[in-house]
Image: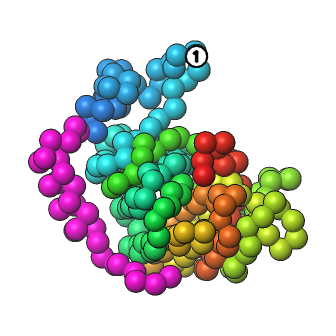
Amino acid sequence: MRNRTRSIIAAISALALATAAGGVASAQGLFGSAGDGSSGILGSLGDLGSLGSPAKPTIPGDGLFDVSAGEVEPGIYRNPGIADTSCFWARTGPLIDGFSPFDNAVDPFQYATAVIIEPTDTEFFTDNCATWEWVAPVPDTTGSDGSLGSLGKPSIPGEGTFDVGNGLFGTVKPGIYQNPGLIDQDCDWERVGPNFETGYEIDPFFGDQVASAVIIEPTDTTFTTTDCATWEWVAPVPDSTG
């Protein structure tokens, strides 16, 4: 990756405070109380949706949210993106030493994003994104040395550059993947599409490991991964993505 920006947590906090001062609703008001059954604008996380199925958590596209206080439900989320706008996100927590985002796009463009928020995270920051939509809970294997995976589900080795295709030899299948990370390893990934390049490196503290998530869209051309564990399939790309 190129043009990395490190140690940006202080800048994130300052931007979040400035945004809050400008009148953005608090996460508590959006989601309701996490433990007392009250409902905010989006309702309690366990309320029933209009079709009678449990409502899935969402996260607004802009703001700083306290994961440890229950303002954000841990899990894997995807974001459809906004036309000609680069969606930026950041996680903080006791396992995370830092991270470096990379983004380079040429108008017109729009690409989706995925993120995993672990129960050990403390805050989640998001800027210039659409609403984050729940995909799946945090896998039981996240935070461990990995798993054996599931039969018949695609996986991607943790090292290499791969063409994106239909799961044929030498290609990776589009979808949403998660990576449990490796102890003391900075998991680094990058996607290349027709009009953009984007990626992240997430650095754990010494002796720790941090999970990652990525969405690979059918329109992507290559996916590069370095110092990661095996990427494990979570879900297909939603029909509306792309």
> Residue 134: x and y, percent?
53, 40
Color style of the picture: rainbow
**How many marks can you see?**
1
Image-quadrant location for residue 192:
bottom right
Q: What amino acid is labelled 1 in the image?
A: Leu
In this view, the residue farthest toward the front is 108
Up the image or down, 70 lies above or below 99; here it is above
Label 1 belongs to which residue?
51
Q: Give the range drawn in magenta.
A: 1-26
Residue at left offset 55%, top offset 63%: 212
Image x and y of residue 238, in percent: 64, 44
* The image quarter in which residue 123 lies: bottom left
Picture residue at 22% right of the left edge, 68% below the top: 10
Q: In this view, does 190 lie above or below 33?
A: below
Q: Is residue 65 magenta?
A: no
In this rendering, position of residue 21 left or right of residue 134: left
Q: Which of 211 and 163 is in front in this view?
A: 163
Q: Can residue 186 be seen in this view?
A: yes
Q: Residue at x 52, y 32 (%)?
A: 56
Q: Is residue 20 magenta?
A: yes
Q: Position of residue 222 (x, y in %)?
A: 67, 73
- Mark 1 Cα-neighbour bin, 10 Å: few <14, some 14–19, many ≥20: few
Which quadrant of the figure has residue 141? bottom right
Is residue 36 something that shows in the picture?
Answer: no
Residue at 43% across / 59% down in the picture?
A: 84
Residue 182 at what x, y percent from top left?
A: 59, 73
Residue 220 against residue 26 in the figure, above or below: below
Q: Which residue lies furthest to the left in this view?
A: 21
Secondary structure beneath dot 1 equals loop
